Amino acid sequence: MSSNEATITLPNNKTIKTPTGLFINNEFVDSHAVTSLVGYSISRIEKISRAHLLHF
């Protein structure tokens, strides 16, 4: 299981912890992203998306 967790507060004021890794082969694993791919809008010359490239 991933060592990274997020704490979420629900509308009824209860809190839960949930893993934040990638769910691969029925388990949460950490990503080892060191690079990201950025998409640009040519007409507006601005960033429109970003995707992390995964390295296992």
Image (cartoon, grey):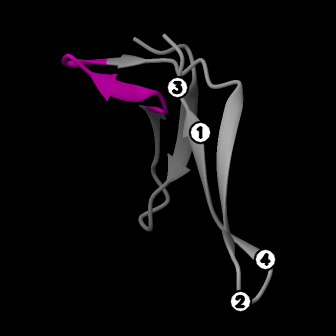
- Label 4 sits on a secondary structure element that is strand
**Quarter of image, res 16:** top left
Whether pointer 1 and pointer 2 mark residues with C-beta atoms closer than 8 Å, the reply is: no
- 4 left or right of 20 in image: right
Which sits earlier in the primary sequence, circle 4 or circle 3?
4
Residue sticking out furthest to the left: 26
Whether pointer 1 and pointer 3 mark residues with C-beta atoms closer than 8 Å, the reply is: yes
Q: Is residue 23 magenta?
A: yes
Q: Is residue 50 magenta?
A: no
Q: Amino acid at mark 3?
A: Leu
- 24 left or right of 32 in image: left
- Residue beneath disc 3: 54
- Residue beneath disc 1: 52
- Which residue lies at the image location 80% right of the left edge and 80% below the top edge? 45
Q: Which mark is residue 43?
A: 2
Which stretch appears magenta? Answer: 19-27
- Label 1 sits on a secondary structure element that is strand
- 29 left or right of 30 in image: left
Q: Point out residue 3 in the picture as x, y percentages from the top left corner.
A: 55, 13
Q: Amino acid at mark 2?
A: Ser
